[in-house]
Image (cartoon, rainbow, N blue to C red):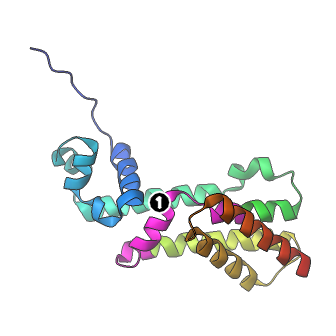
Amino acid sequence: MSQTQRPRLTRDDWLAAGLAALAEAGPAALGAEPLARRIGTTKGSFYWHFADVPSFSAALLSRWQDAAFAALDPAAQASEASLPAAARLRAAAQALASPPAEDAAIRAWAATDRQAVTAICAVDAARQSHLGDRLSECGIANPEMARMLYAAAIGMQAFGAREDATDTIGSLVDLILALR
């Protein structure tokens, strides 16, 4: 009798499954057992790749941070380089108002997890700096404007409708530019 052997799961498979589980069910889904059930494998595979759940959580947060930082990299925005400064600001704000699904889940996780707080703080600082750079290109040097615009983007995430959030934050950018 021949059994079909499933492909071995990689560390990246576990991290991708963890981000998806976090976005769908919150941090309670990040245990070895719930993740193994979700993927359809044993906990042994989890422990092959991670020493324990805290090390998995750290790797998960690191992966999310890397993706968030990469999205701010000028090379990732090469298509926007030829746009006017106001359009680049609008695009940056709109991207932040409709982030990947796991952003809200990680922000919620940070309410109870110190590692998540640290990750959120680092990403928030980078995103605010990015908005500050875009605002500077438009002649707006007040760093509080970046903070307010970013806070509005985070707040709009709570409304849920991504299309509405991008339209609304775009209107806010237009207002800020009109008032300068």
Check disc 1 and report the residue beneath it.
102
Q: Percent position (x, y) of residue 114? A: 37, 77
- Residue 132 visible within the image: yes
76, above or below 27, in the image: above
Relative side of 73 to 15, left or right: right
Quarter of the image that includes the N terminus: top left
Relative side of 138 to 75, left or right: right
Secondary-structure class at tag 1: helix
Res 137 → quadrant? bottom right
Quarter of the image that includes the C terminus: bottom right
- Residue 125 visible within the image: no
Residue at 25% across / 28% down in the picture?
6
Q: Is residue 175 magenta?
A: no
Q: Percent position (x, y) of residue 135? A: 80, 73
Residue at 40% across / 48% down in the picture?
16
Nearer the observer, 1 or 128: 1
Farthest left residue in view: 1
Residue at 66% across / 56% down in the picture?
73
Type of amino acid under label 1: Glu
Residue at 23% across / 54% down in the picture?
34
Q: Is residue 107 magenta?
A: yes
Nearer the observer, 180 or 156: 156
Q: Percent position (x, y) of residue 95? A: 67, 60
Relative side of 42 to 140, left or right: left
Res 150 → quadrant? bottom right
Nearer the observer, 103 or 44: 103
Q: Percent position (x, y) of residue 179? A: 89, 81
Crowding at mark 1 (Cα within 10 Å: few <14, some 14-19, many 20+): some
99, above or below 177, in the image: above
Q: Which range of residues does the magenta coloring cover?
A: 93-117
Query: Magenta region, mostly helix, strand or loop?
Result: helix
Relative side of 128 to 12, left or right: right
